[in-house]
Amino acid sequence: MALGDPRQSIYAFRGNDRKGLKKLDRVVPTSRVSVRDITMTECRRCPKQIAEAANQLMELYEAKPLVPVSEERDNIHLVLWKSYQAEAEGMAKTIVDNIRAYPQEKHLAMVTRRQFGFKLRDHLHALDNKLSIELNFSESLLESWPVRESFLFFCLLVDPDAPTWRAWFAYRNSCNGKGYKATKRNAAAYLKFLHSCNDEITEASVEQLAASPKQPPGGGGKNLRERARRFVILKKQLGWDGIDALTLLEEIFNLSSWDENTLDDLETASLDMDLFRSRACEICRDIRTEKADSTAQQQLKEVAKQLRYHIATREPFESVGKTDLMITTLWGAKGITASHVYVLGLCDEAIPGEMREEYPGTLLDYREEQKRLFYVSITRARKSLVLSRAQYMRRGDFARLGLGRSTGKKIVKLRMSQFLHDIIDFLPRSQNGDDWQGIFGPTE
């Protein structure tokens, strides 16, 4: 059985094909096997108004429109805040009030940038430090260079393989957390180095490269040698005795080990690293509980395996105990549903935002995928949905969040997301955040 919905295909950067189901005849021997196509159009999750808005957003797609069958009354709120800061504070208060009113129901907050999520979490804890909040940013944690480099370094120490060495040598050293992508690809020098190692890079060959007075021949040779030296220096500085696994995790995934004073965006890198370290240590503790007789090396190898899996698949880590609220980026929300859903940061600069250099398709492909991402986000709600955006943002926040090039003004005016604009006629009238009375949940 093959399941899929072209409207929910949001992973083109991972090789996902939106029209994959239509190509089944290429992988199924249709001369011997018949393919039965069953179309499911009933939307049992979302209230009618949300389903209709989603249909409007996807009206040009080949898939048949959703047929809402849920009997939940429509409870949608479109809220406009004066500033990014006001949005975080106001939404935090609303979410806390709604969790207190409906503690047994599931609550999900989605953000267009993980930094929004960190700020929201801080305001939530300021209002109620007993709230259990799960952050699910696994799809984007490696955007911070110190986290990405520390993760690669960790894997090379405890479970090295060819893909990880290749990834390590694909970059160039960075002291400020930027410019780590080599301006000239390192492929030519890497291939020659790989050939000299008989197609098997080892730690000894890396040490030999680092000690060489000459850089490897080919484009990117200087970057390659500097990356080798970087590995040797980091391992020497670490000085791990091989005894305790948690000690290594605490040391490697600690921003103070990665020249944090030179980083341009220290706050984001620090938050990312703290979250990554917390989850890595959590995995390690679980392994030690399950396999009490395992060695530190065995524990660390299993930690690396699980971290690689979660990062590669974008699967969230398991939460511990009851969670009052999950905060996730839009990418992390697929497959998740909740009674009450809050979507923050719906400005055009964030979604669709600017296409990233590494995106595999065209600008049109990118915008269409972002539209499907928005579609997935608004269809998570079973009872209530809040769509929130800010009007203005400080120039420093605008730059730090990677929302585009600043005009030079201290305050940047934000535009409504074009996707939100596409469904505006299917939504209730926008409310000013200062006047909004918050969510009054469904009547019993």
Image: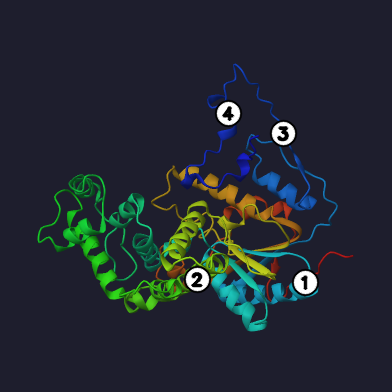
Residue 103's tag is 1
Which secondary structure lies at badge 3?
loop
The outermost residue toward the top is 31
Q: Quadrant of the C terminus?
A: bottom right
Residue found at x 47% / y 46%: 14
- Other residues around mark 4 within 10 Å, as few (<14) / some (14–19) / many (≥20): few
Q: Residues within 10 Å of mark 2 (few under 14, many from 20)?
A: many
Mark 3 touching mark 4, by CB under 8 A? no
Q: Residue 259 in the image: x percent, y percent?
A: 32, 76
Identify which amino acid the numbered label 2 is placed on.
Cys
Question: Looking at the image, is mark 1 or mark 3 earlier in the sequence?
Answer: 3
Which residue is identified by label 2? 281
Q: For the residues labelled 1 and 3, say whether their Cβ atoms are less than 8 Å apart.
A: no
Q: Which sits earlier in the primary sequence, circle 3 or circle 4?
A: 4
Q: Which mark is residue 24?
A: 4
Side of 319 where 75 appears, left or right: right
